[in-house]
Image (cartoon, rainbow, N blue to C red):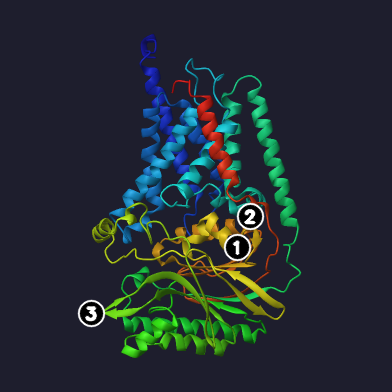
Amino acid sequence: MPGGEAPRASDAPRDAARWTFLAAVAALTAFACSFPLSEDAVGGWPLTFAWPALLGLAAWLAPSARVLAVAVFVPSFLAFLALQWWMREITALGMPFLVAYLALWMTGLALLVRRLAGRAPDGSAAARVPFTIALPVALVAVEFLRGDLVCTGYAWFFAAHPLVEWPLFAQAASLGGGWLVSGLAALVGGALLDLAFARGWRRVAAPLAAAALLAASLGYGAMRLAEPPAAAARAPLSVLLVQTNLPMSNKLSWAPEEQVEDFLDFANLTLAGAERARRDAEPVDLAVWPETMVPGFGLEPESLATLVERRLFPLDRFDRSLRALSRQIEAPLLVGSAAFLGLRVEENRFAWDNQFNSAYLVDEGGRRGRTDKIFLTPFGETMPIISNWDWLEERLLALGAEGMTFDLDTAERPERFSIGTAAGEVRVGVPICFEITAPWASRRIAFDMGARAAEVLVNISNDGWFGPSDAGRRQHLQVSQLRAIELDTPVVRSANTGISAAIDARGRVLGRLPAQAGDSLRVAVAPSSSIPPAARLGDLTAWAALAAVCGLLVATRSRTV
């Protein structure tokens, strides 16, 4: 100190608060940068191992819970604001509320880590839980609460998602789901913190245990990547992915003239792709269009009869066109469309009994089947909690997201389709849009009561909502890769505005189309017949982490925070 002046006691809390803020800012900066920054800027994934450690450091340094909450919430809000910036075009009013909601969860994670692994009342480390235990279980428990249990779940921005860029590490998802991958990433950070701050035997034992678990995980990943998928001997399913390139406004205001013109564009993309495959002597077993790309009121016979009888647009023209298209390409089409049940006209207005976000399987004979969403997109198709009151939902939508309506129904169970190939039938499940992000929903589509029900997953999505953000599109692809590993099931994606791709059962991208371009891509994936441990265990890893957190909270309840 200048002049030999001794440091004042009041300087210590101020210094601790300053270092807490610095650690929190570093943690949330690393968190934001761990996710894709553009379609191909995905190199920040190693930061997934850094940000939990930095967040734990902030929890360790914080002089009080209040200081920690402020230090984490502010950079969390800014990080999620940057990650969700694309939402401003859809709901400028709703975006900051969602961002604040997500920031509160990150703040809660920091406070939970402090409660479990923070300093003892005397400043020693003797009474705390090792970071090697506290950090993984806290992260998985909070991700489980936010992504599944609370407010229908918002399963985005999980630590496991960017780690699919390291396939060797990500294979652990087939054992305990994406939850296990998130936990292992936090385990690395916890071990580093214990190495720095623990005392006695814990300083060595905790990092050694973490290193052993990490080595076992990498060994398992190497073994799994070296083995061919269980069904590699079977003939692959050949799929023609059609990627449309419409702005998200087609869901809000799609004029009849535009519907016809766009439909013709989709058909031409399909015909061009089928012709390329024919020239290359490649079979096409199935052609796929993205979510909601078929205009009109769906393909239900009763709905079409109502339109034809009353001479109302679009009559049955899209149904007839899909049949003709299937005949031309000599393959069925899987197309995204709304499905209206009980469509009728009442007082010169359309009315219906149920409306679903659906996928139809169509061939030259017409509709062969339909599957509906079993999980509606939170904040996109339903408003958690608020959707229980129609009048409140309508007023909030009018205020913050004019033109949107949350009037979809949820199906009780998914349907699967059998697709004929030269080597026999392949069972296909269809997670629609955000369903691929929800582990339970994708698992329920791929498996039925523990038995395999779908050998290939076809994810159809309308990613036009991301607007100019190709980062969001790449994030959606990463989630699909994680789901493929987790369920040991190949995934093919047909997404409006992209990124359409084929992913094998090890999460590796076999081929893809660039974002924001209309095109088609023929891909082939090997159907899967195996049942991985993650499919049998479900969310057991997450429930175990939540139970561990509750147990540790009870065990440390006498400690002052």
Count of marks, rendered view: 3
Q: Residues within 10 Å of mark 3 (few under 14, many from 20)?
A: few
Residue of label 3: 347
Marking on residue 182: none
Label 1's element? helix
Residue shown at the point (56%, 24%) measured from the top left = 197
Check the picture and name the quadrant holding the C terminus.
top left
Amino acid tagged 3: Glu
Residue 446 numbered mark, or none: 1
Contact between marks 2 and 1 (CB within 8 A): the answer is yes
Q: Is mark 2 in CB contact (under 8 Å) with mark 3?
A: no
Q: Which mark is residue 535?
A: 2
Q: Earlier in the sequence, mark 2 or mark 3?
A: 3
Q: Position of residue 49 (x, y in %)?
A: 56, 41
Q: Residue at x 65, y 53 (%)?
A: 536
Percent coordinates x, y for residue 353 in the rendering:
36, 72
What residue appears at the point 45 percent right and 35 percent down from the top-left corner? 110
